[in-house]
Amino acid sequence: MKTFLIPLVAATALLAGCGDDSAKETAAATNETAAPGGYLGAIVQAKNHSEKVIDVAYINQDIQLFNASEGRYPKDLQELIPNYLAKMPAVPNGYKIVYDTNNYSVKVVKE
């Protein structure tokens, strides 16, 4: 009888200990993806940031190419189209492209 009771107690203790940890892991995973500022929110922010950086980099490069070819800087960004810039790039919602004619550079800012 004692030999039967020892494995039963060990199995019960093992199963009781495993149940709590898996529930905590599931709850933690759910909280990370469901939270507004969680993992998915960070991915969206990173995507928007990378799009802005890429757009600004190649527009600034086109401004410098315009200056090298024409001997002057463009008065506005429309002068770059279509010879230097195929079309004005799309920016994420809530942002706009600003051309600074003082230092002849472009940046993306919140509207």
Image: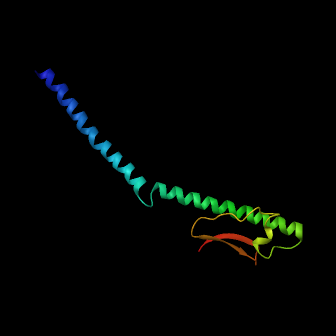
Residue 82: quadrant of the picture: bottom right
Q: Is residue 58 left or right of residue 17?
A: right
Give the x, y percent position of residue 3: 15, 21
Residue 51 position in % (x across, y down):
63, 60
Residue in the image at 34% along x and 49% along y: 27
Residue 86 location, x and y as percent? 76, 61
Nearer to us in this view, 66 or 28: 66
Q: In the current view of this chain or complex, which residue is farthest to the left?
A: 1
- The residue nearer to you, when weighing 28 against 67, is 67
Query: Residue at horizontal 17%, vertical 30%?
Result: 9
Q: Where is 62 relative to 16, above or below?
A: below
Q: Could you say which quadrant of the image residue 34 lies in?
A: bottom left
Name, please, the residue furthest toward the bottom.
102
The image position of residue 77, as x and y in percent, is 75, 71
The residue positioned 28% from the left and 38% from the top of the image is: 18
Q: Is residue 39 depicted above or below 89 in this figure?
A: above
Q: Is residue 43 left or right of residue 4?
A: right
Picture quarter with the N terminus: top left
Q: Quadrant of the C terminus?
A: bottom right
* Residue at 31% in and 43% down: 21
